[in-house]
Amino acid sequence: RLCRQGKHAEAAKICQSLQSSPSHRVQAAALRGLIQASPSKQVSMIVAGLAAEEPWKRAVAADCLVSTDKPEQIQAVAAAVPGLPAPGKIAAFVVLKHRSHAAIRQAALKSLDAPQSEVRAAALASLIKSASAEDVARLATLAATCKDETVRKAALETMRLMTAKGTNAAILVAMSDEKTLTPDLVRCALGRRSLEFTPGFLKAAVSPNEAVRLEAFQALETMATEKDAPALVALLSKTPPGNQREAAGRAVWLCCSKIADPAKRPIPLLEVMKTADAAGQCAILPSLARLGGNQSLAAVHAAMKSDNKEVRDAGYRALANWPDASVADELLEVAKNAEIPEYRIWALRAYARVVSLPSDRPPQKTFDMLTAAMKLAARPEDKQLIVSRLSAVRVPQALALLVSYLDDPQLSAAAVPAVFTLAKGLSQSHPQEAKAALEKVQPMTKDPAVVQQIPKVLRDIEAREKGKKK
């Protein structure tokens, strides 16, 4: 109150008299008041407090620095930071990271060589608002070469959040240098969510570093747009089998899916297919199949007739990856008559998947289709897949069939959750059948969530039945 009245000397006298108090809380309050009551000495007192050994003095000084808003005061404190002990530097940088000033930048850059990782990390955080784009090169080198994980992460986080004009361009330059191009830098660039980085991701996708390539393809899953499709498909056609090809395929599929006209989505892949070798065709076919459509299906059919076994296999795999039930009849035909066992297995599993997808088809028809598939299944895992798909078919015959599998040692593990799911779905339309199925499956389930839900579904069935009687 005295300070607000301009009576700074009186206020200072009171605060000085309290500095000898045995209570640290009183001493802290007195120091805070003394700094407030000494306008001409505020900067020097804040710096002295930051340099103190006592944590409470540093805390008071830092708190006073928070309320300091004059640029010349910020500059003076920042200029003193490199000469502070490590705890004082950290306290100062924690406050200054919310400000933007050239002096903060200079103090932080000088502190990047400090022996304490905590100091370096705090200095890096203070650069988020104060750094310039020209600092990116040093930050990228630090992120790529520093042995201290804390410092590496702090450097990457600073680059991810930096606000300086030209930061994206500077990061792209770092991405073009093999010495600083790391998977972490690719993730950092992705974190900035700017389309400026897409060319950099495409370039990184051919890096000699396998981990960088994988990270680049994963970034392209998010950032590639339809105009990047031709270049991305070309990369996919040259990507060897494995995680990278899978990531590249997902990126191509997501990229082409952004094309507004569904009929035009396969075109970038079909164009590359025309000149691709066998390995390239094998790489492209899975993504082509996921897009669906008549043009894609024609290419898949051509691959299925190829003289090259790898391409032929990829064609049948592609058919099995089809996104909808438009190829269901063809899949069933392959499952019945293909000479190669693998083709039959792929087709049967795909058939079970696509026919159980939501559709306008009557549920009874879907049930008939799945029971036909069950008759073709020879392997336990294929039967288990069909059992799980039956849980989506809301007809009482499907529930009865699933209940019959509860005593089958090979199928009971898949039948138990399927019975619960379907019985719950039929609990209103066919309450008696659902109740009987739930009561049978109740002692067999080990899933805690299902154990809790079964009594509730049974109570709901009973409540509805009582309501009807009334």
Image (spheres, rainbow, N blue to C red):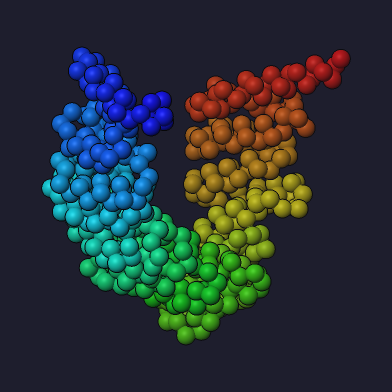
Point out the residue furthest to the left here. Answer: 115
Residue shown at the point (68%, 43%) measured from the top left: 393
Residue shown at the point (19%, 18%) measured from the top left: 20
- Of 140 and 231, the residue lying toward us: 140
Residue shown at the point (26%, 71%) measured from the top left: 177
> Where is residue 74 shown, x and y percent of the image?
31, 48
- Of 330 and 202, the residue lying toward us: 202
Q: Does residue 80 sit above or below 249 in this rendering?
A: above
Residue 242 left/right relative to 321: left
> Where is residue 217 shown, x and y percent of the image?
41, 65
Q: Does residue 69 sit above or below 21 in this rendering?
A: below
Q: How many marks?
A: 0
Quadrant of residue 219 in the image?
bottom left
Residue 115 left/right relative to 276: left
Q: Is residue 304 visible?
A: no
> Where is residue 434 shown, x and y percent of the image?
70, 28
Residue 340 left/right relative to 355: left
Q: Is residue 18 visible?
A: yes
